[in-house]
Amino acid sequence: MNKKTITFQGFQEMKNKGQKFTMITAYDYPTAVLVDQSPIEMILVGDSLGMTVLGYDSTLPVTMEDMIHHSKAVLRGAPNTFVAVDMPFGSYNESISQAISNGNRLMKETGADCLKLEGGVNLAPTVRAFVDAGIPVMGHIGLTPQTASLLGGFKVQGKDAESAKKLMEDAMAIQEAGAFSLVMECVPSPLAKLVSEKLTIPTIGIGAGPDCDGQVLVFQDLVGLYKKFTPKFVKQYLDLGSQIADAFEEYANEVKNGTFPSAEYSFDMNPDFLKNLK
C-alpha cells in the first residue's frame, strides 16, 4: 500500500472531520515493518515493553537505554508511520532540567515524532517546557501505569464526581500546556466522551470507550502473545501465541521422528565428489 506519515496537523484535521485513527504498540523491527504495511496511522513504543518483551512485573524498571534501543529498531522498520515514544519512569520526575535533557536525548537518538509523558495538572509545567524546547508531547491521563500504585492499582479512574472532575482538570491542563494529543486509559466511556468533546486536541483511548478520536492497543494483547493478564478492554483479534506453540511442538516432533529436514529442505551434491572421502 502507498502509505505516508501523517503529521500533527493531519491528526488534528482528522479530529476536526470526525475521522477515527488507530495506534498500536511495537517494540522491534519486524513488528514495525508489519504496522508500516498496514492502515494503522500511529505506533507507540511504549514502556509496556517492560512487561510484554522484557518480562518485568511493571513498567518501572524500564530505562532510557531500553527505550532508545527498541525505538531505534522500530523507527528503522516504520519510516511511513508516525512514531511516539514513552519517556520511562524516573527520566522526567526529578526536575524540568532533567526531563528536557532526557527528552532531547530520546528525540535525537531515536528520531521519534513525539514523546509521551504520564500525568495531569502536576505535569503541565514539564509539558510546557518540552513544547517550548521544541519537543512534541503526547499526554497520558487516567490510569497511568508508571504511578499505578498511587492510584490504587490497575483500576478504572474517574468513576465518581470528584475523580471525574480531577480527570477533566488534568485533560485541560495538559492541552493548555501545549500537548498535541492525549491518551486516556481506563476511563468510563461517558467521561471519556465528554473530555473528547471539550478538548480541541485529539484524544486516544485505551479502555476509554468508543468516542475518543483514536484508539490504541498493545500489540501482544491484540494478537494473543501476552498470557499473564488480559485487560477487560482488550479485544484479541488473533491467538497467535497458541499458533506459535503448536508450531514449536510440530517442529520438535518432526526433528525427533526424522521427517525434518526432508530432501525438500536439504542441499544435494554430486556423489562422485565424496568417493575419495570414504
Image: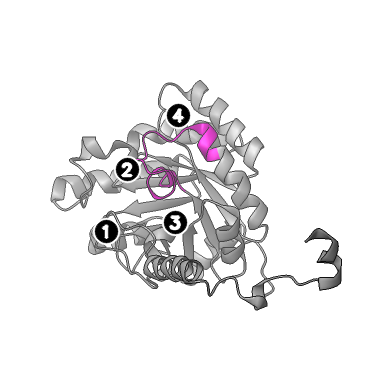
Task: Determine crowd level at label 2: few under 14, some 14-19, many 20+ residues with C-alpha closer than 10 A.
Answer: many
**Circles 4, 3 touching at the beta carbon (< 8 Å):** no
Going by the numbered disc 2, the residue's amino acid type is Pro
**Circles 2, 1 touching at the beta carbon (< 8 Å):** no
Q: Earlier in the sequence, mark 4 or mark 2?
A: 4
Residue identified by numbered label 1: 231
Going by the numbered disc 1, the residue's amino acid type is Pro
Going by the numbered disc 4, the residue's amino acid type is Tyr
Going by the numbered disc 3, the residue's amino acid type is Thr
Which is closer to the viewer, label 1 or label 3? 1
Residue at mark 1 to residue at mark 3: CA–CA distance: 29 Å
Please determine whether, in this image, residue 170 is positioned above or below residue 203. above
Q: Earlier in the sequence, mark 1 or mark 4?
A: 4
Look at the numbered disc 4 and give the secondary structure of its residue.
loop
Q: Residue 87 in magenta?
A: no
Residue at mark 2 to residue at mark 1: CA–CA distance: 13 Å
Magenta-tinted stretch: 46-67
Residue identified by numbered label 3: 200
- Whole-percent x, y for residue 265 in the image: 65, 73
Please determine whether, in this image, residue 173 is positioned above or below residue 246. above
Which is closer to the viewer, label 4 or label 2? 2
Residue identified by numbered label 4: 92
